[in-house]
Image (cartoon, rainbow, N blue to C red):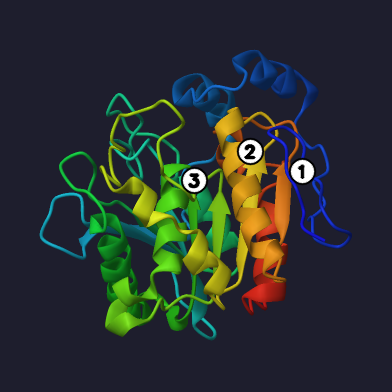
């Protein structure tokens, strides 16, 4: 039977949805609900920054490694300060920003931020190497520039991550918001990866978009996918792919993200291959990511469980 999703409630078949226990502290939950169904990086970041830690002395960050010639084609590698044991799997993260902004370590005002080092620290604590990716931005660069960037970043990791203690054969990629749209589009188009291969064991799409046609009555071109946005839907490729992926939407995401998750789940489940799905309770658009590496493991715990079951993560 085809699953149908409304804009606010996902009707999930037994065994499909990952459990999401409410873990947000009550005072934070009230403030997140006060922010509401909007994307406010600064207000949400201010709630979570006091809960985060700086990079521990047990870890080292190598910043702004270039995987291309553009200033934005850079990545950070976060690894144990002293490598030991067998090579670690690699967790690659792709930030959001509405396709036109965003950065791996700067907030929207251009100031240094603890985010998204928090995700890198969490990855290392859980037996992985963290790779934080920047990419070229719209409107100067349009499709498929970012998917090419992700392929180039994967190629860089395959060629270089061993020197940081990573295993180039075990790569996982997570994207959030516009980053999730980019990662999903990359998974849907493996021909844009190195040698026509994704190079990924598994992927995570958190609060992403998967179809890009204008809404009824809307004529504006998409800032990244352009006037042919309707032709760049990720749905056919995501139905066809054999790469496991996890679909996440936050309870307090703007309604459009719920609609997009529903479209993806409907399309893939209709083909008989439902992916795991997580409705992130008590979180807004930004707060789930900002909570990673705190006591709230509602997002990070589900991602770890997914990687263990679907991506071969053993640590």
Task: Report crowding for label 3: few under 14, some 14 to 19, many 20 or more residues within 10 A (C-alpha).
Answer: many
Closer to the camera in the image, 235 or 296: 235
Q: Earlier in the sequence, mark 2 or mark 3?
A: 3
Task: Tell me the SS state at disc 2.
Answer: helix
Relative to 16, is 157 on the left or the right?
left
Q: Identify the image quadrant of the N terminus.
A: bottom right
Instruction: State yes or no: discs 3 and 1 in contact (Cβ < 8 Å).
Output: no
Q: Earlier in the sequence, mark 3 or mark 1?
A: 1
Q: Is residue 3 above or below residue 253?
A: below
Q: Please give the residue where the numbered disc 2 appears in the rendered image.
A: 258
Closer to the camera in the image, 183 or 210: 210
Q: Earlier in the sequence, mark 2 or mark 1?
A: 1
What's the mark number on residue 10? 1
Q: Residue furthest left?
A: 69
Relative to 299, is 206 on the left or the right?
left
Q: Please give the residue where the numbered disc 3 appears in the rendered image.
A: 209
């Amino acid at each position: 039977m085809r699953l149908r999703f409304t804009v606010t409630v996902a009707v999930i078949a037994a065994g499909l949805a990952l459990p999401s226990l409410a873990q947000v502290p009550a005072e934070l939950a009230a403030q997140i609900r006060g922010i509401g169904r909007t994307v406010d990086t600064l207000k949400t970041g201010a709630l979570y920054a006091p809960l985060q830690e700086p990079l521990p002395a047990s870890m080292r960050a190598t910043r702004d490694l270039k995987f291309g010639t553009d200033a934005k084609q850079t990545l950070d590698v976060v690894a144990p300060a002293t490598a030991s044991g067998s090579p670690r799997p690699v967790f690659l993260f792709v930030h959001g920003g509405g396709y036109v902004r965003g950065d791996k370590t700067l907030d929207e005002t251009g100031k240094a931020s603890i985010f998204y080092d928090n995700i890198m620290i969490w990855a290392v604590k859980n037996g992985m190497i963290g790779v934080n990716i920047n990419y070229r931005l719209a409107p100067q660069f349009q499709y498929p520039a970012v998917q090419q960037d992700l392929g180039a970043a994967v190629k860089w990791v395959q060629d270089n991550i061993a020197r940081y203690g990573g295993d180039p054969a075990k790569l996982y990629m997570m994207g959030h918001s516009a980053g999730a749209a980019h990662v999903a589009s990359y998974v849907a188009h493996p021909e844009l990866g190195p040698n026509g291969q994704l190079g990924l064991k598994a992927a995570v799409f958190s609060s992403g978009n998967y179809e890009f046609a204008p809404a009824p009555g809307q004529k504006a071109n998409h800032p990244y996918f352009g006037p042919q946005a309707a032709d760049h839907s990720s749905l056919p490729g995501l139905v066809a792919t054999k790469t496991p992926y996890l679909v996440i939407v936050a309870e307090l995401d703007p309604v459009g993200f719920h609609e997009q998750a529903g479209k993806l789940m409907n399309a893939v489940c209709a083909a008989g291959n439902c992916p795991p799905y997580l409705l992130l309770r008590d979180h807004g658009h930004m707060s789930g990511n900002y909570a990673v590496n705190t006591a709230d493991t509602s997002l990070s715990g589900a991602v770890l469980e997914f990687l263990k079951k679907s991506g071969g993560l053993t640590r």
